[in-house]
Image: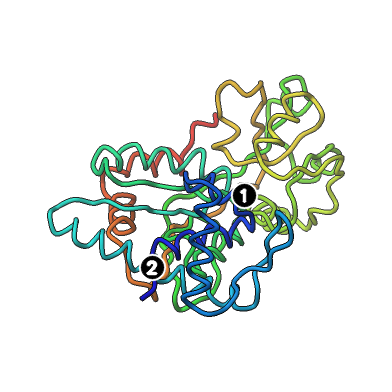
Amino acid sequence: MLNPIELNVFAMAAETENFSEAARRLGVTQPTVSLHIRSLEERLGIDLFTRSGRNVVLTDAGRALIPLARDILQRCARIEETMLSLKGEVVGLLEIGCTTASGKYVLPRILRGLRDRHPRLEVVCRVTNRHDALRLLHIGDVQVAITSLEEASRDLDYREFATDHIVLITPPGHPWAGLGRPVRPDELLQGEFITREEGSGTDAAVREALADHGIGIDDLPRIMELGNSEAIRMAVAEGIGVGFVSALVATEAGAGPVQIVPMEGMSPQRALYMVRDSSRPATTAQTAFWDFAFSPEMDGVRDRITRPAIA
């Protein structure tokens, strides 16, 4: 019979492709990892890794075992969670896939109250881009995704949590900051923009808003592209240029001064969704998070995100 402990060690070794790193993450010694892997290989009668000095690479058999091992481990976790839930406790591990902004500005506002209600619940946040958040959900590596991307799928259950507004920010001394009126769309063509990468939620929202005025995002003069909104905010605060960021990021305290400048006839925004895979049995941890996120207790949090203080 397969040993769940050996499968757990294998899953970590497969993720890191390094027995020493797997041992560090598991809190055991490297020889212990090697012993468990060797025992599992003998039990299955096939090599799971190709070893070359300190390096290990998954064999075809190892790659085939990964999703099966993860499925067994998830089932084991659900058994434990279900038994404990019968005693009225919500325990277990909940893994959430989200972007940097959601992980910093949305999740903490939910988790503070959730942890007060369920102190034995452990949450791991997998910070990535919005496409990968859904990919991780599809393959079962996370149980909930927070994303502004809505992909057509019969298995994914989307529920809108809040609306994230995208705003134009400038350094305090920038000419647009002293106009005393909204910036016209045609005036944006005279700016020096620090932009997000194509495919981000901010990029998609800005593209759509500009298109309504016959302007392509590539028409905006670009001096720099950065990988997240916080980096753009910092660059704008340093006086390098102007940019579009989430209002959640723009109103962050203590990250350098920026000025939010209104735009005439433009209000880019994106819906933030909570997403779960309805084809997989829900864990008690996932259900507890989902129910709490959409409870009346969270109405104030959703309202603060949807209607930020950006005046």
In the picture of the structure, the residue carrying the numbered disc 1 is 268
Q: Is residue 221 left or right of residue 77?
A: right
Q: Residues within 10 Å of mark 2 (few under 14, many from 20)?
A: few
Q: How is the image coloured?
A: rainbow
**Looking at the image, which is closer to me, 114 or 236?**
114
Q: Is residue 129 left or right of residue 162?
A: right
Residue 178 position within the rendered picture, expressed as x and y whole percent measured from the top left:
73, 22
Q: Residues within 10 Å of mark 1 (few under 14, many from 20)?
A: many
> In the image, which disc is placed on residue 138?
none
Amino acid type at circle 2 is Asn
> In the image, which disc is placed on residue 3?
2
**Looking at the image, which is closer to me, 55 or 272?**
55
Dot 1: element: loop
191 over 75 or under it: above or below: above
Write the residue at 44% across / 63% down: 6
Q: Quadrant of residue 211?
A: bottom right
Dot 2: element: loop
Amino acid type at circle 1 is Pro
- The alpha-carbon separation of the residues under discs 2 and 1 comes to 52 Å
